[in-house]
């Protein structure tokens, strides 16, 4: 008899969830498409003037990426709840926070990572100055995991509800205001020639804290919603 | 007195602020009173129905 | 050593004046029973009598209103119990996009595996030889249930909590469940089964616990 | 047992708290009304006009106490939420959830009065001043807690989930506040701080503190009233609630 180890469980969970995303890869593209469409709408609303677009580029991309991720957050535990996998997950012998951490990692790497990859394209659409692009990518790389982590806590709280979309938005958005402020703020500072390290460091510190606390909080929240 | 209510031209800002404060707090204070009555009424109705079901 | 002896004699699972309430409304209780190695116990009750809820309370998914659940004589905590308990609910916990084999590999990755068995062997013993790589979506409800039963065979859990294990199964499937239970009991395991009574055991007479909603 | 602990223990029992809160309720409302009236009289009539802002500064006497209360109510909610989650005390769940709508009301008043103050001071109804922006985020946090509480069917589970959200919010609140301050200085907004603490003279200060006292007392009055309602709802099957009924029946004839 071989009892499962925590690392084997994490690997099994990561493999299964990535495999599931791969099998439903059409759905996985939706957030990407959403972000591109949202960004493409702005020039229609504001006119194609380069200076105007460049001014709002970083903020627009940030908002579009966060909204696109929010759109996909709802599904984080939905299918697991519907087919009973979530029950099995909660009952598994391993720390639930660790397992949820794996699920959050999968969420981030399958929704945020593609968004970061297309961010240069979005930046080009909105005429973001080339020297700001690295700052934008760094800020996105730090801010998107925060959304996955904090979002997971909120999803865990709303997991049993049939229509949680609007409520989830209401729960998540106030909590991730700082990510938007620091992330887009760093880009704006870089664009205006100011120092941009401080907000990025703040994001990093917050991310480090959230990476530890959020999975624990998500596990506790999930236990509350399931019992 | 009229001077007091005029607030030296700031009446349009000062009095609405106090009005909002008063309205919000009165609404907040009244809501539980009505809820309290409604619950007791509902409960009494439920008990009456239960009693009439037992002894028709 | 005395501790070991004590745990030896303590029942695998014990419920002591267990009650459960939802929104302050009593669902069942008080319940007293114990399960020793080799026991297969049937919980009988009508729809809505709280059978599924009881299994969830015993597995630690739901919290009892009062009373206690003891596992090997020690109070139940989620972390401890889950090594030894396998729950099969109405929802099977299987992914329809994945094949039977992929589902089982995930289960063994999560919960470990018994010695002397492989996912392939488990599938063969529930009569699904040749369906290893078919996505679960293409299988029938009964066949999916069999995959879930194969998971029970693989995962090293001494206590099985089975919610309506006979549902969706044909004659052969019902026999299969009985054979698995028999095997499990002889191996020193124990099982708690719910049923609303439509299915009869084909072999042996298990202990029965009637469950009635408390008025 | 320590008599104070014993009393707290007794207070935790729903019927005892129901009677206790019912006895105190009229007194609390009366104290809040009287001290509030004194404070407002002092603020509106006795305090001298501000040399810069003229009489518009008198909005301070509603705005600032409400802003304090919006934070106080949140802290109170989170503290009770913590107790509810750790020690599973039913009364704490109820108190946490009862303070949410009161806190939201205070936050709302803070925003509206801040806006009414901003118009004569800054020339605009809304400015993204750091404190106002934080208040706005706080209002959304309140809405989230209230929304979550009403979206879950099981009352106790709902209270626990919402209390948990309140705790997540309180961990996040300092980060929100700091980020908003940073953002505000980056954008060099037209922020004129309402008043520096040193500028305020004693005859301006005492009405402010009196009103602040009144709002705190009011908070507990409203809290008790709401908690009584929630207790009745949650415990409607219990004998002590049924015991309340004959009297009300008789009163209605």
Image (tube, grey):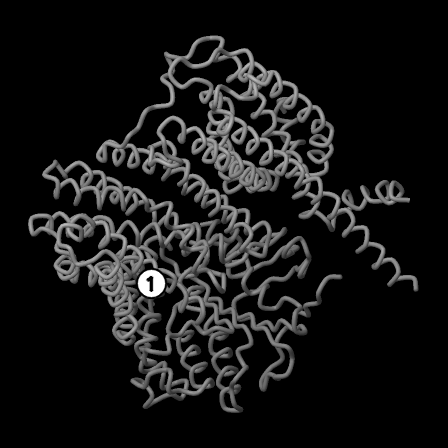
- Secondary structure beneath dot 1 equals helix
Q: Residue at x 52, y 90 (%)?
A: C170
Nearer to us in this view, A69 or D206: D206
Alpha-carbon neighbours of circle 1 within 10 Å: few (<14), some, or many (≥20)? some
Q: Position of residue A165 (x, y in %)?
A: 43, 60
Position of the C terminus of chain C, as image quadrant, is bottom right
Residue D6 versus residue C94 in the image, above or below: above
- Residue D77 is at least partly visible in this image: yes
The residue shown at (59%, 73%) is: C194
Q: Quadrant of residue D18?
A: top right
Q: Is residue D69 left or right of residue C118?
A: right
Residue at image point 51% right, 61% down: C59
Q: Is residue C1 above or below residue B54?
A: above
The chain that hosts pointer 1 is A
Q: Position of residue A61 (x, y in %)?
A: 22, 55
Q: Say left or right for D109 vs A179.
A: right
Given residues D43 and A83, the one toward you in this image is D43
Q: Residue furthest left?
A: A131
Looking at the picture, how far across and down is residue A67, in whole percent? 31, 57
From the viewer's side, name the closer residue of D245 and A7.
D245
């Amino acid at each position: 008899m071989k009892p499962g180890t925590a690392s084997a469980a994490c690997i099994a969970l990561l493999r299964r969830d990535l495999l599931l995303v791969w099998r439903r890869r059409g759905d996985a593209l939706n957030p990407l498409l959403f972000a591109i469409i949202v960004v493409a709408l702005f020039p229609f609303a504001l006119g194609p003037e380069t200076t105007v677009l460049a001014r709002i580029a970083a903020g627009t991309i940030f908002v579009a990426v966060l909204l696109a991720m929010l759109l996909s957050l709802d599904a984080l535990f939905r299918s697991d709840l519907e087919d009973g996998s979530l029950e099995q997950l909660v009952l598994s012998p391993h720390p639930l926070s660790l397992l949820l951490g794996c699920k959050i990692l999968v969420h981030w790497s399958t929704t945020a990572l593609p968004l970061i990859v297309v961010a240069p394209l979005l930046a080009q659409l909105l005429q973001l100055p080339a020297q700001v692009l690295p700052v934008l990518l760094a800020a996105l790389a730090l801010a998107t995991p925060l959304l996955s982590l904090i979002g997971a806590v909120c999803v865990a709280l709303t997991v049993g509800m049939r229509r949680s979309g609007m409520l989830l938005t209401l729960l998540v958005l106030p909590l991730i205001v700082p990510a938007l402020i620091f992330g887009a703020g760093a880009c704006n500072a870089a664009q205006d020639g100011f120092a941009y390290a401080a907000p990025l460091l703040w994001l990093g510190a917050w991310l480090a804290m959230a990476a530890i606390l959020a999975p624990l909080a998500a596990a506790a929240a999930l236990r509350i919603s399931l019992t | 007195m009229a001077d007091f209510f005029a607030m030296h031209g700031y009446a349009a800002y000062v009095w609405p602020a106090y009005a909002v404060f008063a309205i919000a707090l009165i609404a907040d204070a009244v809501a539980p009173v009505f809820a309290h009555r409604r619950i007791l009424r509902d409960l009494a109705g439920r008990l009456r129905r239960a009693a009439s079901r037992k002894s028709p | 050593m005395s501790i070991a002896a004590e745990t030896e004699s303590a029942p695998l699972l014990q419920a002591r004046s267990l009650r459960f309430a939802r929104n302050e409304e009593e669902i069942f209780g008080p319940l007293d029973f114990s399960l020793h190695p080799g026991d297969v116990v049937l919980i009988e009750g009508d729809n809505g009598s709280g059978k599924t809820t009881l299994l969830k309370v015993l597995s630690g998914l739901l919290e009892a209103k009062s009373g206690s659940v003891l596992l090997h004589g020690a109070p139940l905590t989620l972390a401890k119990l889950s090594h030894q308990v396998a729950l099969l609910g109405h929802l099977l916990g299987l992914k329809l996009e994945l094949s039977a084999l992929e589902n089982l590999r995930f289960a063994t990755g999560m919960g470990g595996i018994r010695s002397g068995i492989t996912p392939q062997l488990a599938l063969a013993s529930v009569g699904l030889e040749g369906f290893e790589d078919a996505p679960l979506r293409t299988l029938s409800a009964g066949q999916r249930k069999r995959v879930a039963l194969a998971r029970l065979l693989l995962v090293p859990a001494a206590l099985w909590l089975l919610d309506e294990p006979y549902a969706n199964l044909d004659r052969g499937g019902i026999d299969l469940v009985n054979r698995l239970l028999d095997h499990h009991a002889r191996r020193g395991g124990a099982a708690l089964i719910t049923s609303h009574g439509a299915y009869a055991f084909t072999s042996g007479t298990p202990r029965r616990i009637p469950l009635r909603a408390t008025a | 047992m320590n008599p104070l602990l014993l009393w707290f223990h007794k207070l935790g029992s729903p019927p005892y708290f129901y009677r206790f809160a019912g006895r105190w309720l009229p007194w609390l409302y009366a104290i809040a009304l009287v001290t509030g009236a004194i404070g407002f009289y002092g603020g509106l009539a006795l305090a001298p006009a501000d040399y810069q802002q003229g009489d518009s500064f008198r909005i301070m006497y509603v705005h600032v106490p409400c802003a304090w209360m919006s934070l106080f109510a949140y802290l109170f909610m989170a503290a009770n939420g913590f107790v509810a989650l750790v020690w599973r005390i039913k009364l704490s769940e109820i108190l946490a959830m009862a303070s949410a709508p009161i806190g939201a009301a205070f936050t709302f008043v803070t925003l509206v009065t801040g806006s009414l103050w901003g118009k004569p001071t800054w020339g605009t109804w809304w400015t993204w001043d750091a404190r106002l922006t934080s208040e706005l985020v706080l209002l959304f946090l309140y809405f989230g807690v209230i929304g979550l509480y009403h979206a879950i069917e099981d009352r106790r589970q709902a209270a626990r989930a919402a209390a948990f959200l309140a705790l997540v919010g309180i961990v996040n609140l300092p980060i929100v506040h700091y980020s908003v301050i940073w953002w505000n200085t980056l954008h060099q907004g037209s922020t004129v701080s309402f008043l520096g603490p040193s500028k305020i003279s004693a005859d301006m200060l005492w009405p402010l503190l009196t009103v602040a006292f009144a709002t705190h007392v009011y908070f507990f009055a409203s809290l008790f009233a709401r908690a009584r309602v929630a207790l009745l709802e949650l415990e409607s099957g219990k004998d002590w609630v049924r015991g309340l009924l004959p009297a009300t029946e008789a009163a209605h004839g």
